[in-house]
Image (cartoon, rainbow, N blue to C red):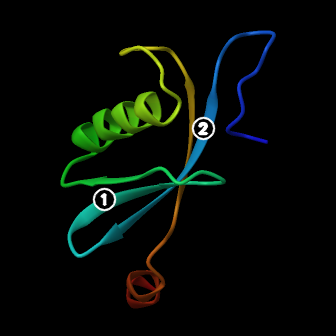
Amino acid sequence: MVHTLKEASGLIEVKFEIYESDGYLCASGVGTSIHTWAKTWKKLMKNIQDAVELYYNMPPNTEFKLLLETRVNQGAEAAGS
């Protein structure tokens, strides 16, 4: 599973699906109930870090591996073709 603690390295890997909704960048954890949003990428990354730390009860600024997957807006994609 992507979001489980890896005993050998001590790192947690978390996969997020990133998409836009109503002018916000949204992140939903795959296989977890972690969800957050923001107006900017910088703020979204900070919100994801905070949410992961809270979900896994980790100390602040704990290192973890973040895997991002983006969802393309099909309406925008069709308009651009």
Q: Position of residue 30 (x, y in %)?
A: 62, 54
The secondary element bearing badge 1 is classed as strand
Give the crowd class for mark 1: few <14, some 14-19, many >=20 residues within 10 Å: some
Question: What residue lies at 69% left-to-right and 11% top-to-bottom?
Answer: 10
The answer to whether residue 2 is above or below residue 28 is: above
Give the crowd class for mark 2: few <14, some 14-19, many >=20 residues within 10 Å: many
Question: What residue lies at 72% left-to-right and 33% top-to-bottom?
Answer: 4
Question: What residue lies at 39% left-to-right and 31% top-to-bottom?
Answer: 49
Label located before the other in sequence (1 or 2): 2
The answer to whether residue 77 is above or below residue 71 is: below
Question: For the residues carrying marks 1 and 2, which lies nearer the camera in this image?
Answer: 2
Residue 64 lies in what quarter of the image? top right
The answer to whether residue 69 is above or below residue 3 is: below
In this view, the residue in front, 32 or 70, is 32
The amino acid at mark 1 is: Leu
* Label drawn at residue 25: 1
Q: Where is residue 56 in the image (x, y as percent from the top left)?
A: 53, 30
Q: Judge from the rendering whether residue 66 lies leftward or rightward of residue 9; answer left or right.
A: left
The secondary element bearing badge 2 is classed as strand
The amino acid at mark 2 is: Val
Query: According to the image, label 2 marks what residue?
Result: 14
Q: Judge from the rendering whether residue 57 lies leftward or rightward of residue 6; answer left or right.
A: left
Q: Judge from the rendering whether residue 79 lies leftward or rightward of residue 29; answer left or right.
A: left
Q: Distance between the residues labelled 1 and 2?
A: 18 Å
